[in-house]
Image: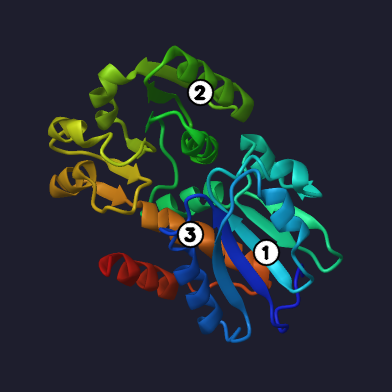
Amino acid sequence: MRVRATDARRAAVLGSPIAHSLSPVLHRTAYRELGLDDWSYDRFEVDEEALPGFLGDLGPGWAGLSLTMPLKRAVIPLLDEVSETAASVEAVNTVVFTDDGRRVGDNTDIPGMVAALRERGIEQVDSAAILGAGATASSALAALARICTGEVVAYVRSAERAAEMRQWGERLGVEVRTEDWAHAARALRAPLVIATTPAGTTDALSAAVPERPATLFDVLYDPWPTDLAARWSGYGGAVVSGLDLLVHQAVLQVEQMTGRAPAPLDAMRKAGEQALASR
């Protein structure tokens, strides 16, 4: 066990910007459900420059940290150990402080994506499409390495991004073909479409949703639904949301930080839904 779950401990989410984060809602809900009444979970605005000092100032009462942009890569040199999953995409979103004081980094986004898809009955696909080519797209590729048996087509906006996605594919053992974003509507006929782009980017694709769409995984959760997700669902397609991803990756974080399993998935999801509805 990495931490002493009976002791009062602290955890937090770090990033910049961070005010929008739902992580405190999810983790605090988990602590209540698990009876960890002395545990606390906060949020801190921390950028890359401030991260080393923040970590250096943490006391022995800390159990772990959740990291969002722009810290997922910046934290790696500051850790004692990085999991194979995190190393595969050069991104850490979870830091656990062990009983002997070591900083261990992991990436729960990747197994969180897989778990969110499996919850919708998606165990395996023979091909897939990714919209976008940023950090989340590389995590999506790593998730597809576990469930996709064939080609992944990535729709990107530049030759540089296309080259990066092909390199990630080689590194992860995924067959990747890239297409220009101008042809992104073609992606919508894939058995699985993973949209990793910022809010509003895919709105123009809504009119191209086929009459019998398969599965869309849109990593956004606020605002929700996106135009694409709403049209997709309206045509009877399966939709996996960014909240699904957020909850599943948070479940894994809670289990790692507290040493308690299983974390209360349903209660955490309900709390997240209520928090979003109140915005």
Residue type of the residue flagged with mark 1: Gly
Mark 1 or mark 2: which comes first in sequence? 1
Say which residue appears at 82% left-offset and 58% top-offset.
Answer: 102
Residue type of the residue flagged with mark 2: Met
Which sits in the foreground, 85 or 122? 85
Task: Name the disc covering residue 47, or none.
Answer: none
Please indicate whether residue 59 sits to the left or right of residue 135 in the image.
right
Which sits in the foreground, 231 or 124? 231
Please indicate whether residue 121 sits to the left or right of residue 186 in the image.
right
Residue type of the residue flagged with mark 3: His
| Marks 1 and 2, how far apart at CA | 31 Å
Q: Is residue 155 above or below residue 236?
A: above
Q: Pointer 2: what residue?
A: 165
Residue 108 percent coordinates (x, y): 57, 52
Q: Pointer 3: what residue?
A: 248
Mark 2 or mark 3: which comes first in sequence? 2
Task: Name the disc covering residue 64, or none.
Answer: 1
User: To which quarter of the image does residue 88 belong?
Assistant: top right
Residue at far top of view: 159
Please indicate whether residue 175 sits to the left or right of residue 276 in the image.
right
| Marks 3 and 1, how far apart at CA | 17 Å
Say which residue appears at 59% left-offset and 53% top-offset.
Answer: 46
Residue 201 percent coordinates (x, y): 28, 34
User: To which quarter of the image does residue 43 belong?
Assistant: bottom right
